[in-house]
Amino acid sequence: MFKILKKEVLAPKTILMETYAPLIAKKAEPGQFIVIRVNEKGERIPLTIADFNREQGTITMVFQEIGKTTNLLGTKNVGDAISDILGPLGNPTETDRYGTVVTIGGGVGIAPVYPLSRKLKSLGNKVISIIGYRSKDFVFWEERMRSSSDELLIATNDGSYGAKGFVTDVLKNLIDKGTHIDRIYAIGPAIMMKAVADLTREYKIKTIVSLNSLMVCGMGMCGACRITVGGETKFTCADGPDFDAHLVNFDELMKRLNTYKKEEKISFEKWKEEVGYGA
Ligand code: NAD
């Protein structure tokens, strides 16, 4: 059992939870993820490790309440426990001193961008971060992102905070201004990562994305998270989750992400009825 030490609502339907998991905290690196089961009958879901504190033995997850399991997790409070947390899984994000690096986060994807930006900055890179939210109400971790970046650019879809538009609009402006960029990392919705890849392919800027495929085992055995990268079948969990954005078949990824939408909806509706959720 993993005790919940902190819970914070960061934005609508966006929850931060910190749990005591010293063995995971000891080994976790930016880019890695965990697979959790909220209770012993629960389904397994992957969540990116949004932060970790080796001294305190804690890990932080930031998740969106979307379906049954994430909403069930959202009902847990400080003092409650999560039945199982498996990790750290996946390969750490490859980092080095590249020069000028742009880190891009979209919505909940901003959470894993934070420790990555912090690491890239500590390695001596100039870090320009671009973070995008739907609107001002959804803004979270602005200060954390500012402290881990040399320059922070914010966009909201409706222009209620920062620049109006998508992260890709801000990135295009940056490139068009003549900013030299050695490498880009992007984490967020698949459609955003695809849009970033399409843009940077044109400019031949090396771009790394962290994929959010559906997963079951998280260790390369079940094949649920398979994707096509450079024409080859890869497992997001064991081969990734980071891949060269220009080689990923995003259309296939998005199609596979929607495979169980109908079943997910039925399961969520059934659960809401059972527990009287929202009544
Ligand atoms: P969202 O729909 O609110 O979008 C966030 C931002 O992404 C937008 O504000 C915009 O700037 C950008 N964006 C969206 N659509 C775009 C498009 N068509 N073109 C260019 N930019 C676009 O995001 P959300 O609802 O917070 O969802 C976050 C997503 O991040 C989820 O899909 C989640 O699975 C994913 N995620 C991925 C990881 C990972 O490791 N890969 C980790 C956490 C979250």
Image (cartoon, helix red, strand yellow):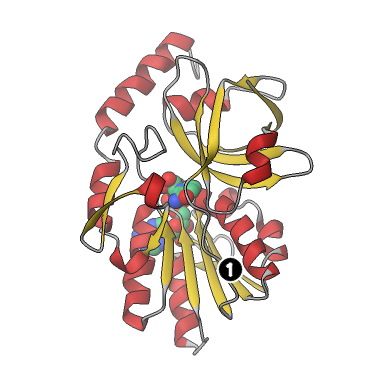
**At 33% across and 62% down in the image, what residue appears?**
194
Q: Position of residue 134 (x, y in %)?
A: 49, 53
**Depth order, front residue of 129/153:** 129
Note whether 139 is above or below 131 in the view shown: above
Q: Residue at x 46, y 26 (%)?
A: 69
Q: Decide if residue 57 is in sight here.
A: yes
Residue 258 image point, x, y percent: 27, 40
What residue sits right under mark 1 in the picture?
129
* Relative to 54, 87 lies left or right: left
**Residue lying furthest bottom in this view?**
178
Specify whether 184 is left or right of 54: left
Q: Amino acid at mark 1?
A: Ser
Along the line of sight, the residue nearer the viewer: 64 or 29: 29
Reply above or below: 62 against 268: below
Residue furthest to the top in view is 274
Which residue lies at the image location 70% right of the left edge and 35% below the top edge? 22
**Local SS, label 1:** strand
Q: Position of residue 36 (x, y in %)?
A: 51, 30
Residue neighbourhood size for the residue with mark 1, other residues' Cα within 10 Å, grouped as few (<14), some (14–19), many (≥20): many
On the rendered image, what quadrant is the N terminus found in? top right
- Residue drawn at (27%, 50%), measured in percent from left and top? 227
Q: Relative to 219, does residue 80 appear above or below in the rendering?
A: above
Mark 1 within 8 Å of ligand 1, using the beta carbon: no
Left-right relation of 201 to 123 = left
Residue 96 coordinates in the image, percent (x, y): 58, 71
